[in-house]
Amino acid sequence: MALNAIVSGASRGIGRSIAHRLAREGYSVGINDIPEASADIDNVISEINSILSFQHSKPRPGAVALPGDVSSSSDVASMVSKAVTKLGPLTLMVANAGIAPVTPLLLSSTEEVDRILGINVRGVFNCYTEAAKQMISQGDIALGAGITRYKLVGAASIAAFRAFPGCGIYSASKFAVRGLTQATAAEMARHNITVNAYAPGIVGTPMWDEVDEGIGEIEGRPKGKTLEAYSKGIPLGRAGVPEDVAGLVGGFLASKDSDYVTGQTMLVDGGIVFN
């Protein structure tokens, strides 16, 4: 049976890199992001289908577009249904979509709190649960190609281990992802589903450009200088790149090598946080 994955928030940055790595590891991939990012989704699909065409004279279904809002359970259910129809049984869900607004707690509006938690926590919950329902309905017979377990993988952050000033609600949302990952792992083990999360540090992506600007305003730095200042304290000597995260997710967590790992949130941050 072919390996089929969905990656949410995959039109750019870390999600895009994870989707690329999964394609290289033999997965067909459903590319999700909000409908407004449809052009970027299409670009990633073209890139991945080129990878698969190069790897196989008769390529698998390849990459398909799954636009939708992860904070909506009906959108996620539709994503899963479309992925299965177009690609085949779902074997991996990567709940990567998230946002990282920079707002001091005393300036955080109810609307912003709801938005952050809606995407970062409820979005992961929706992806975990809708994918798990599909995987359970498929049974073990859908597994193959050396993979013996279904896999759910979610996006946490170094902020899930150490809260950062200016990013209080974001930090809280990522702590929640750790807890949700542990709880889901405990409940899904009997269904032959592992559940793990990845915790990136400072990664050069469009999202971090926004964080850099927001923290810079609070701490009095010009644009670009916060990334530079924070990167100096990384033990391995540099900020991360999306491929660093994709190596953990696509190279390990999505492979049979992680079959005996569940309930973990793995840091990939160059040593910012020791755990």
Image (tube, grey):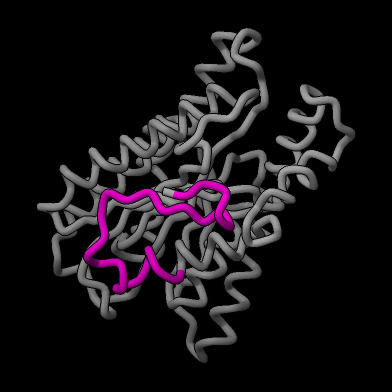
x 40%, y 30%: residue: 122
Question: Which residue lies most toward the left here?
Answer: 190
x 38%, y 52%: residue: 153
Confirm whether residue 82 shows in the render: no
x 59%, y 34%: residue: 99
Q: To which quarter of the image does residue 51 belong?
A: bottom right
Residue 109 screen position, x and y as percent: 60, 9
Which image quarter is the N terminus in?
Answer: bottom left
* Vertical relation: 52 (above or below) 150: below
Residue range in magenta is: 251-274
Residue 58 screen position, x and y as percent: 48, 87
Q: Is residue 209 left or right of residue 13?
A: right
Task: Confirm whether the magenta stretch covers residue 124.
Answer: no
* Vertical relation: 70 (above or below) 27: above
Question: Which residue lies most toward the right here?
Answer: 222
In this view, the residue in front, 114 or 259, is 259
Question: Which residue lies most toward the bottom here?
Answer: 57
Residue 231 screen position, x and y as percent: 72, 50
Confirm whether residue 84 shows in the render: yes
Q: Is residue 63 left or right of residue 189?
A: right
x 29%, y 73%: residue: 256
Q: Number of marks in the image?
A: 0
* Vertical relation: 74 (above or below) 45: above
Residue 50 screen position, x and y as percent: 62, 77
Task: Confirm whether the magenta stretch covers residue 256.
Answer: yes
